[in-house]
Every structure is written in structure tokens, then in C-alpha cells.
Image: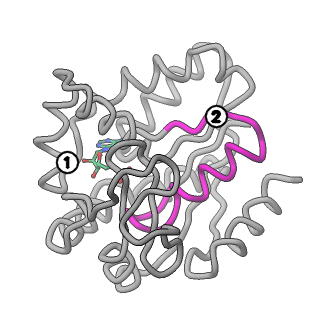
Amino acid sequence: MKIIMLGAPGAGKGTQAKQIADKYSIPHISTGDIFRANLKAGTELGKKAKEYMDQGLLVPDELTCDLVMDRIGQEDCKNGFVLDGFPRTIPQAEALDAALAKINEKMDYAIDVDVPDENIVNRMSGRRACLNCGATYHIVSIPTKVEGICDRCGNQVVLRDDDQPETVKKRLNVYHEQTQPLIDYYKKQNILKTVDGTRPMEDVFGAIVEILGA
Ligand code: AMP
């Protein structure tokens, strides 16, 4: 099962993607996580990506596409995968389709987690992330057991630079300009499914499982 998660930054697609990956035993591939891991490891890719991420801009397609194509070509992806945060532009979607067409494959589902902008800005200010292990929380809906401390690894959780309110507004503009056109792109391919992302997380996941099958 090959799945794309679509939705504005902060719509909750990452949380849903992780749960889908667990339930269907397929890898969760988050380009944001890959960039952050590179940044932490001090790679050239990480340093280049940070320049764009901190400004709320997209990392250029040429830095993004190859790393995703390499990742989905790995052995653990042969039964499928869930893409979280990729594609984010029409050229990325076309590159993905072209890479899959070469091996006679195509994406099965593009799931749009739909949340209006006003909810997004509120949600993002409560988001907390562990810069050590990548776990994400929300001060209201997914709090850490001990305030400010990651449940998984015990490091501090913080408001990421790219979740700061000004950056969030910029990321939303970028989303509307560059990523939202993908909704029509996948509608035309007949693989678009929309779920209401304003509902409680468990209900959103329930709606996704209904689409994908138990
Ligand atoms: P995310 O964790 O998915 O919200 O991604 C955080 C940041 O990483 C984004 O705001 C972009 O700067 C960058 N990024 C992640 N995925 C992509 C992508 N597919 N194309 C370009 N930039 C990306």
C-alpha cells in the first residue's frame, strides 16, 4: 500500500502517518524528519536545508527528490510506504510518478487531512518537538507525561524554529501556493481521499482506516 499524506503544516498528517505505518507495517517516510536528522548529524544536506526551513520556505526540489527516490527504492519499502511531507510541489509529484512508472508501480492513495488555516495557527503554537528523537507533542492534545520532557528519550521538548507564529504564517502561504495544487493533481488521478482533520485524532485515524481497509 503506497500512501501520500497531504495537508497544511500542522494539520496532523505526521501523527496520522505514524499510526498508519504502525498499523499496516510499512515505513513512515517524512522528508522533514530526514532533513532534521541531517541537520543534527551536521551533513551538507542538513546545513543547506536549514537555510530554507528556518524561513518557512521549501527546500529546493533538486535536494529533495533524489533522497526520497533512494529511500523508496530500499528493501523495506517493497510492500509499500507512507509519505509524510512529500510531495509538496507539482514537480515533486511528477518526479515521484515518473520514478514509480519506471517499475510499473503507482501511488494508491493521497489522503488530504483537511484543517482550516485559523485552526492551524492555534495548533502550531502549542506544538512541541524533541530535537533529539523527533517525537512530537502538543501541550493540549498530546502532552508529555512530564512537562517539557520527551516521553520517549527524556530530552527537552521545544517549540521548533519553524513552528514560531511568523514562520507558520509563511509556511501556510507556501502551502497554499505550492502544495495545495496537489489536491487537484491527485483528484484527477482518482486517488484523492479527504478526511476532516478538525475531529479528534482517533476519529481522524478511524476515517483513514475506513478508507484503507482494516
Ligand atoms: P515538515 O516537518 O514536514 O513540516 O517539514 C519541515 C520543513 O522541511 C518544511 O517547512 C520545508 O522547509 C522542509 N521540507 C520538508 N519536506 C519538504 C519537501 N517535500 N519539499 C521541500 N521542502 C520540504
Magenta segment includes 213 = no
Q: Is mark 1 within 8 Å of ligand 1?
A: yes
Amino acid marked by disc 2? Phe
* Residue lying at 66% horizontally and 61% vertically, measured from the top left: 193
Magenta segment includes 27 = yes
Relative to residue 26, is residue 163 drawn left or right?
Answer: left
Quadrant containing the N terminus is top right
Residue 203, given in percent of the width and then of the height, sits at 72, 75
Q: Classify 26 as above or below 101.
A: below
Q: Classify 8 as above or below 34.
A: below
> In the picture, residue 165 is in which quadrant?
bottom left
Q: Which residue is mark 1?
A: 53
Relative to residue 131, is residue 135 drawn left or right?
Answer: right
* Residue lying at 49% horizontally and 73% vertically, measured from the top left: 143
What is the magenta range? Answer: 6-29
Task: Tell me which label, 2 or 1, sits earlier in the chain.
Answer: 1
Relative to residue 17, is residue 117 drawn left or right?
Answer: left
* Residue lying at 35% horizontally and 45% vertically, measured from the top left: 89
Q: Which residue is mark 2?
A: 81
Amino acid marked by disc 1? Met
Q: Classify 113 as above or below 68.
A: below
Q: Secondary structure at mark 1?
A: helix
> In the picture, residue 136 is in which quadrant?
bottom left
